[in-house]
Image (cartoon, rainbow, N blue to C red):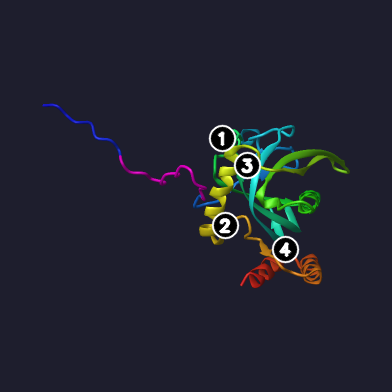
Amino acid sequence: MTRTKKSNNFSVFGTRPENTIFLPDVPYSVRLNCKDGGLFVGGNEAQHRKSNPDEKIDISIVKVSKFFGTLGKTENVLWIQLFFVAAPGVDSQILPKNTVCCSYIKKQSIAHLFNKVQEVMEHGDPGMGIFTLGFNREAGENGVYYTIDFDWRERETEQEKQQLELIATFMSAYSGQLIDLEGTRDMTCVDGWTAQQLQGITTQRQELPESSTRSLLGTLNH
């Protein structure tokens, strides 16, 4: 009797579709490591490193939001949340192809991004092009650290132009689903806040103990 081999036709985690932008159920969290320089995924140890400080990574930014609060060991500061997709040509060992990623930047890195945005706005729309992430080596009172640098260019290759079409299709359907609940659990979104409102929350957070600041965030987020 001949047995016919059956193929497995089920998937535990679903499949990633081809030729479209993919949004995971849990955002693909990428740490832009300002202590060691480079992209890290899953932790801060050497095995989590995806790129080195001297490498530059091309990305397409699809959403930018402002948050105030605590992430990791950094408390009570302004953060910029970046949702982005690796540009065509980026090694998939560094960032997965056409997959929405999420990162956070602070302090000098925020200034680097928005200074570049203002430069590009003189002649075009920054969101239509390619941003290039780089790491600047800095020296401070506590030793060497890195800030995130941002360069920008027009889309050049056919693949880059096709990806923009994929992004436009994706954003029209899923822009409201670009949320990172875990990353922002100790933050509040401050998009659209005035400078006076930001100053107010900064003062409140600095005056309250940590247990009270968590309660304050819970109130502001509801």
For disc 2, the marked residue is 178
Please rate how many residues cluster around mark 2, counting C-alpha atoms within 10 Å: few if below 14, some from 14 to 19, many from 20.
some
Between marks 4 and 3, how big is the CA–CA gap? 24 Å
Most common SS among magenta residues: loop
Give the quadrant of the N terminus: top left
Nearest to N terminus: mark 4 or mark 3 = 3
Which is nearer the eye, 55 or 73? 55
Secondary structure category for the residue under label 3: loop
Which numbered disc flags the more N-terminal residue, 2 or 3?
A: 3
Q: Which residue is mark 1?
A: 92
Whichever of callouts 1 and 4 sits on the residue coming sooner in the sequence is: 1
Local secondary structure at mark 2:
loop
**Foreground disc of the pair 1, 4:** 1
Do residues under tags 2 and 3 come within 8 Å of each other at their CB atoms? no
Q: Residue at x 65, y 73 (%)?
A: 219
In what element is the residue under mark 1?
Answer: loop
- For disc 4, the marked residue is 210
Residue 20 painted magenta = yes
Which residue corresponds to mark 3? 43
The residue segment tinted magenta is 9-23
Q: What is the three-letter code of the residue carrying label 4?
A: Glu
Q: Residues within 10 Å of mark 1 (few under 14, many from 20)?
A: few
Q: Position of residue 82 (x, y in %)?
A: 66, 52
Q: Quadrant of residue 133?
A: top right
Among numbered discs 3 and 1, the one appearing first in the sequence: 3
Check residue 67 in the rendering and tell me which mark sits there, or answer none. Answer: none
Camera-nearest residue between 71 and 196: 196
